[in-house]
Image (spheres, rainbow, N blue to C red):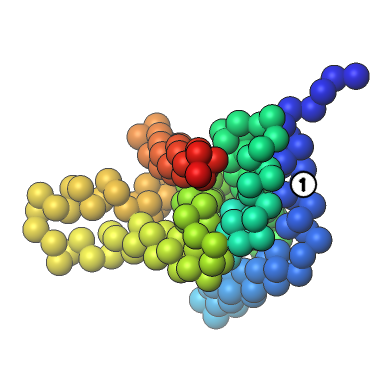
């Protein structure tokens, strides 16, 4: 019988922990309420069968809801001391982080599943352009991958879940709103802020324009914070 990879075992354990806790269901329910308000305000009030309003606010929604999902991943282990037991097992810090990250990413992507009903409603009552719809969901997956990595890193830094939530939410919110203040900045700074702002890259993809620079931005951002998390876990193992 083939031995399971350590990261896969950790991922399975984390997923079981997510969905045996009411937190994941509460977060998912609240996300569905807020995203539903954004969609149906456009659908019924404006009379438009489109998801532009939903995708426009998605970076900010993810800035709050993804940190709520990831805040306990390492913080709870640090608080209870089980991280020490985990790190004494024949498993590398990279495998620990990989398992926890993939489980957290799956949990984050579950938030998007109920929103597929919005797509169905648009198709039934209108004729939406499928390019921006597909681009919007591709951008959402990439955005979730980046923000999940940020949330995981914040969780690895502290035993306090609330601190982990606010730290991750602050970073994600800055990335989501950075381009809002570009009109107030001098020219040379605007270029830098435009590159750093996650919402700028997301907006480009959500319009159905798939630019490899935008895709690489999200992949690089996720990889950077995953590396940071691995280094933090390595330091914890040495201690």
For label 1, the SS is: helix
Q: Nearer the viewer, residue 226 or 29?
A: 226
The number of numbered discs placed on residues in the rendered structure image is 1
**Rendered image quadrant of residue 209:** top left
User: Residue 13: in sight, yes or no?
Assistant: yes
Please report the residue visible at 13 percent of the width from the left and 62 percent of the height from the top: 185
The answer to whether residue 58 is seen in the rendering is no
Q: Of 191 and 92, which appears nearest the observer?
A: 92
Determine which quarter of the picture holds residue 127.
Answer: bottom right
* In the foreground, 28 or 164: 164
Q: Nearer the viewer, residue 111 or 84?
A: 84
Q: Is residue 215 above or below residue 13?
A: above
What residue lies at 79% left-to-right and 52% top-to-bottom? 16
> Farthest right residue?
1
Residue 104, how many percent across, how many down? 63, 50
Q: Is residue 5 left or right of residue 27?
A: right
Q: Please give left or right for residue 22 compared with residue 51 in the image.
A: right
> What residue is drawn where x is 69% and y is 45%?
85
Question: Residue sitting at 50 percent across and 60 percent down?
Answer: 158
> What residue does disc 1 label?
13
- Circle 1 crowding by C-alpha within 10 Å: few under 14, some 14–19, many from 20: some
Q: Position of residue 57 (x, y in %)?
A: 46, 65
């Amino acid at each position: 019988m083939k031995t399971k990879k350590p990261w896969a075992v950790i991922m399975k354990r984390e997923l079981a922990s997510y969905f045996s806790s009411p937190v994941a269901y509460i977060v998912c329910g609240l996300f569905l309420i807020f995203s539903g308000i954004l969609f149906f305000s456009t659908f019924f009030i404006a009379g438009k069968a489109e998801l532009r309003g939903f995708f426009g606010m998605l970076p900010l929604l993810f800035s709050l809801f993804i940190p709520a999902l990831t805040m306990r991943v390492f913080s709870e282990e640090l608080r209870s001391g089980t991280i020490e037991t985990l790190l004494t097992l024949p498993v590398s810090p990279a495998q620990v982080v990989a398992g926890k990250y993939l489980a957290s990413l799956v949990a984050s992507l579950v938030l998007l599943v109920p929103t597929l009903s919005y797509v169905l409603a648009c198709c039934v009552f209108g004729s939406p352009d499928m390019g921006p719809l597909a681009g919007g969901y591709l951008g959402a997956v990439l955005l979730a991958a980046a923000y999940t990595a940020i949330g995981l890193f914040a969780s690895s830094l502290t035993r306090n879940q609330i601190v982990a939530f606010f730290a991750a939410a602050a970073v994600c919110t800055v990335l989501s709103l950075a381009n809002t203040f570009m009109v107030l900045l001098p020219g040379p700074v605007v270029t830098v802020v435009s590159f750093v702002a996650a919402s700028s890259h997301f907006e480009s993809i959500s319009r159905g324009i798939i630019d490899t620079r935008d895709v690489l931005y999200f992949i690089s951002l996720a990889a950077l914070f995953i590396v940071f998390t691995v280094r933090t876990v390595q330091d914890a193992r040495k201690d």
